[in-house]
Amino acid sequence: MDFQVVVLAGGVSKKLIPLVSKELPNALLPVANRQLLSYVVELLELNNLKDLIVVVEGQDAALNVGAWISGAYADRLHVEVAAVPEDVGTAGAIRAIARHLYAKDILIVSGDLVSDVPIGAVAATHRRHDAVVTALLCNSPISGPLESVSSGGKDKTKKPGRYDLIGLDPTKQFLLHIATGAEVEKDLRIQKSILRAVGQIEIRADLMDAHLYAFKRSVLLEVLDQKCEFNSLKHDVLPYLVRSQLKSEVLLNGTPQAEENGTEKGISQKNQQMLSQILANASEPTFHVRHALGTNGSDSVRRTHKCCVYIAGSGKYCTRLNSIQAYNDINRDVIGEASHLSGYSFSAHNNIIHPTAELGAKTTVGPHCMLGEGSQMGDKCSVKRSVIGRHCRIGANVKVVNSVVMNHVTIGDFCSIQGSVICSNVQLQERAILKDCQVGAGFVVTAGSECKGEVLAKK
């Protein structure tokens, strides 16, 4: 399709500490015993997109990601790993690699996306409409917007939910308004020019920007060059392109005039699920065509551009791993309702126990569980809805529920782990009890400890 593909793999996200570190950047975080980045890479491969630029923040993280990619995909894909400075932002990351971009259209994918949406369909939508940008939208997680969840520490104060408020035309093909992460209780302001031109606009709060975009390269690089202050594709570049799609130069009687000054119309937003502003018949031509023709049918506007969307079907899985809660949810989904994403074959008991794993007498591993290569469990253990990594040593009478245990973890007798994430090389001494905790790599939980809602990590 002549698309260049850029995967923004990030670096070491503060939102995911203590799960991530310089040694284990976001991209290599294990999800159902696979590296997070493998989900995006193999989705691209499935859509016959095999020439990738993977952008990683930080030199150390880039070296680790590059080494993993070389071992896993050397004979299947052509992948160039580019290191950019830390905290440069998604827009800054694209600026940093701009000289490597040459194709007419660029497909930019977040490395934390776990999805089965056909990326080829997004690319086809972009080409069909000759759009400057096409964004993938998917249903918001049932548990609420991903940005609203806490990291599971002691601070249990509820923060207001933050949603993407998205305005669509009647055909649900064109993006007319986007307020990313807007608090729903606030008023929504929409340009009069958009309302007048489109005839009908539907504002949705039940859709999420999946951070997968097709951009026209020339427009993207021009915007990034002119708007040096832009830091984020989602929060800066996309809203700018959406706002400016009807602000192109207007010709009246052959004389250029500025488009209207962006006067906005405020609409009070009361319901977090839906807000509609109905103005006219939906069967008319798209607003881009109508606006370009002008009121008397003359060509009154130049350079109008189109911002389009591809909305994933309700049966598709599409979410981002950008919080610790999301990490728990996605691990559970990939060994549960979205097991087709795991890449593994499940047993008759609907679980995955590696042939080299060993189970003690009267030990049960329930449905929607995974036990990794070389791991050993003692007698009378119970595992429910959990992922256990490779080469773990688990004693007797241990209970693991709704948890993720990474690799090379040692768990003593009579321990209980619930709703927690245990990073690699952790040691839990006997009779330790953890509920809703995150334990950083290499930490030792002393015998008899009882912890609830805590982050335990080396200083």
Image: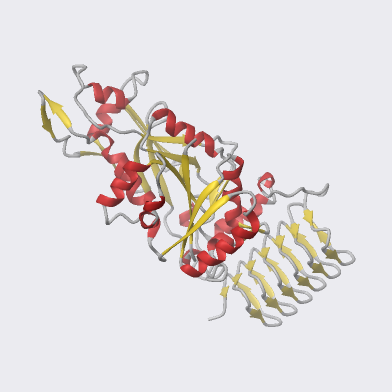
Farthest residue, direction right: 361
Q: Is residue 416 visible?
A: yes
The x and y percentages for residue 425 are 67, 74
Can residue 269 be seen in the rendering of this structure? no
Identify the residue shown where x is 16% and y is 39%: 261
Vertical position of residue 163 compared to residue 248: above or below: below
Asked whether 413 or 91 is in front, the reply is: 91
Q: Nearer the viewer, residue 66 or 33?
A: 66
Report the side of 304 relative to 309 (left or right).
left
Residue 188 lies, in percent from the top left, at 31, 43
Q: How is the image coloured?
A: secondary structure
Taking the image as shown, residue 212 lies to the left or right of residue 301, namely right
Q: Position of residue 448 (x, y in %)?
A: 70, 81
* 376 with respect to 96 (left or right): right
Q: Residue at x 70, y 77 (%)?
A: 428
Query: How many dots with numbers?
Result: 0
Residue sitting at x 55%, y 67%: 20
Residue at 42%, 30% (x, y): give it: 173
Give the x, y percent position of residue 330.
61, 53
